[in-house]
Image (cartoon, rainbow, N blue to C red):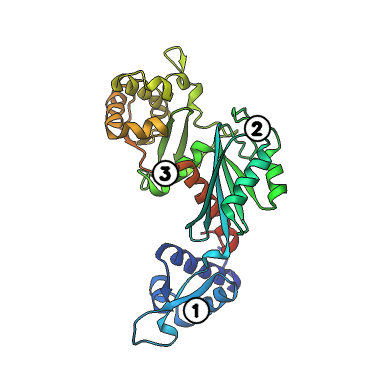
Amino acid sequence: MKTATPSTARAINDRLALDLLLERGPLSAPQLRSLTGLSRPTVSDLIERLIDSGLVEVAGESGEDRRGPNARIYGLVAGRAHVAGVDLRRDIVHVTVADLTGRTVGSAGRPIGGDLVDLVEGVLAEAAGRRSLDTVVVGAPGLVAPRDGELVSSNDVPGWRSGLVASWRERLGVPVVLENEVNLAAVAEARGGVAQNAEDFVLLWLGDGVGAAVVLGGRLRRGASGGAGEIGYLEVDGTAFCNLVTSAVARGLARTEFAARIAKGAAAFVSLLDPGLVVLGGECGRAGGAELAEEVAARLRDLAPAPTEVRASTVKGDPVLQGAVLTALDLTRDRVFGVSA
């Protein structure tokens, strides 16, 4: 085992302090010492380094009668970096811009039309205003190859063509990452939804589009070619699963019949992966709520051998957009903070 060099140790300590400021908000030097277990000189040095680097600033003082270095409260410089999440659907594109702390500072949306490079650039500019962007993460339907981040199958988004990601990178001059939209929704579910404490789960996306995301051991699993979770192609009772559980089909079915269809698709994941938790997302999964989840769980018990909890998604707003922002923040913080957590 190699001993950490002084520079590596400093970088690790700095990242520890930065993550605490992200998680807890502004902190004093004594609070940082208590939370990190680091010595007074070490904390003083790291605060000075982080201020000099433009990552941390004095955010105020604690206690009306206290003065001096120990009374100062230090916080992240939220405007040090900005990221954008993009939800690119077949009919509309939405963008959210957030600062380094994750606070939303801008948003915009437009119908799909015209050249996609121009369209996304324009919506990003509208959402960002005068702010420069550090990272952009785009969520879109389709299989995204893990090796090069390019789409490897048609996604029915009007105007989509090969090389779009490279064109966005060239036009914007910042890192642009493409990810399957259901995978991004799973990121949001794992961070702020019903899967927060689950190391293993499957998110079933039920709506105008049908798909799934697989999380095992706390990690999103994309598969060798990005096809993990493409349950829409699964044949159920002689019909592709994607044709059995769309929004249009759901409107004409009783809840019990709709639940039975969902359970047949979910049983494939349960039998092969034993995730322990299936989350019902997308328009239909969220609208069905606890009642639909309970019905699916009851049906699933008769179809699959492993005990499995079924819950409806609880992520508020657009989970794809939230997952895109969270992913962009992870990438930007690792780059700006210097050492991965």
- Above/below status of 192 relative to 341: above
- Above/below status of 293 relative to 249: below
| Mark 2 closeness class: few <14, some 14–19, many ≥20 residues within 10 Å | some
N-terminal-most mark, 1 or 3: 1
At 46% across and 19% down in the image, what residue appears? 243
Q: Which residue is mark 3?
A: 317
N-terminal-most mark, 1 or 2: 1
- Above/below status of 265 relative to 125: above
> Which mark identifies residue 132?
none
Q: Quadrant of the N terminus?
A: bottom right
Are the two marked residues, 1 and 2, in contact with CB atoms closer than 8 angstroms?
no
Identity, as a three-letter code, of the amino acid under mark 2: Trp
Label 1 vs label 2, nearer the camera: 2
Q: Secondary structure at mark 1?
A: helix
Q: Secondary structure at mark 2?
A: loop
N-terminal-most mark, 3 or 2: 2
| Residue 109: image location, x then y, percent | 54, 43
> Which mark identifies residue 160?
2
Identity, as a three-letter code, of the amino acid under mark 1: Thr
Mark 1 vs mark 3, CA separation in Å: 42 Å
| Residue 300: image location, x then y, percent | 32, 25
Residue 248 or residue 32, whichever sits in front: 248
